[in-house]
Amino acid sequence: MDDSKGCHLSVVVDLSPTQWLLSAQSSLPLNSFLAQLLAFLNAHIASKHENTLAVFGAFPGKSLNLYSSTDPASETQVIDANSYPPFKLVDSTIVTRIMEELDDLGEPSEEAPSSLVSALTKALCYVNCVTLSTTSTSNKRADGLDPAILPDPRILVLSVSPDLSTSYIPIMNAIFSAQKLASIFPLYSVFLQQAAHLTGGSYIFLERRDALLQYLIMSFLSPPSIRKTLSVPTQDKIDFRAACFCHKNIVDIGFVCSVCLSSRSFHLVN
């Protein structure tokens, strides 16, 4: 890896109010999660000046871009001698956007499912756009290398919501796209466990949620080029169960069409 090149990290965060209310009962409330996540994001920015960052929030029924280091700040930041400006910009922007969106949700009678697939798709599109734009618009150095190219882009997915069988097909489509663009490093998902396996990433189910920052720093801070020389978490067992196309249920044994490769929970008789 060229020392002059930075690394891009896209983070997809599940922000379902109901699921975070349940998570608060198991030692990880939303405010503690955000504090640990922001510390990890600041560590990524501090690792190298050329590193870039994008954060996407998966809210009930919609997904939003919460922060992007390629976009200028929308408002003037107050100078604080006790804080590093880039860190403060990341922290204030992400927290403000999240609080605004959660306040706008109110208290609906029935909460819509988290738009995790939508946020993951936007993260993939962002990686593609940034990589293509830097490749086509930047100038070449004397040695022929392009310092603006983002090698080894990766996507970190943090999910607390249970898997939805209806989202299996969109997730698999996103996985096939991610195989050409980035590695996926998910937490808390059976479907995303398959995504990590197919894209060369890592999957971790946290046994101690209050130690989230330690998991993030030790397992996901280093770029993929360095991870090859480190002892990173591996998956001993991978759950390859699929969702049937007919009823959208997760099945252990099903029937696969030899033409379209769709899986079904029953046998079609002509």
Image (tube, rainbow, N blue to C red):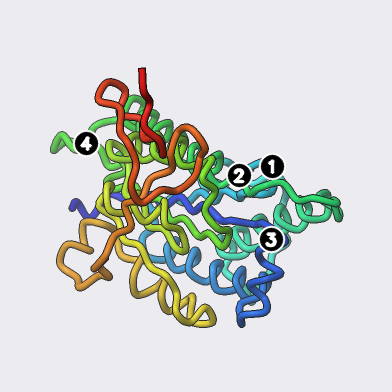
> In the image, is residue 139 above or below residue 165?
above
**Which residue is labeled 3 in the image?**
95
> Cα distance, mark 4 to mark 2?
41 Å
**Which residue is labeled 1 in the image?**
61
Q: Percent position (x, y) of residue 71?
A: 56, 41
> Cα distance, mark 1 to mark 3?
20 Å
Quarter of the image where the C terminus is located: top left
> Cα distance, mark 4 to mark 1?
45 Å
At x 44%, y 68%, the residue is 43
The answer to whether mark 3 and mark 2 are in CB contact below 8 A is no
> Cα distance, mark 4 to mark 3?
38 Å
The tag earlier along the polypeptide, 3 or 2, is 3
**Which residue is labeled 4 in the image?**
141
Of the pair 159 and 124, the residue shown nearer to us: 159
Of the pair 195 and 80, the residue shown nearer to us: 195
Of the numbered discs in the image, which one, if any, rests on residue 115? 2
Q: Residues within 10 Å of mark 2 (few under 14, many from 20)?
A: many
Q: Residues within 10 Å of mark 4 (few under 14, many from 20)?
A: few
| Helix, strand or loop under label 4 | loop
Residue type, numbered disc 2: Ser
The answer to whether mark 1 and mark 2 are in CB contact below 8 A is yes
Residue type, numbered disc 1: Gly
Q: Percent position (x, y) of residue 18?
A: 71, 62
* Residue occupying the far top of the picture: 270
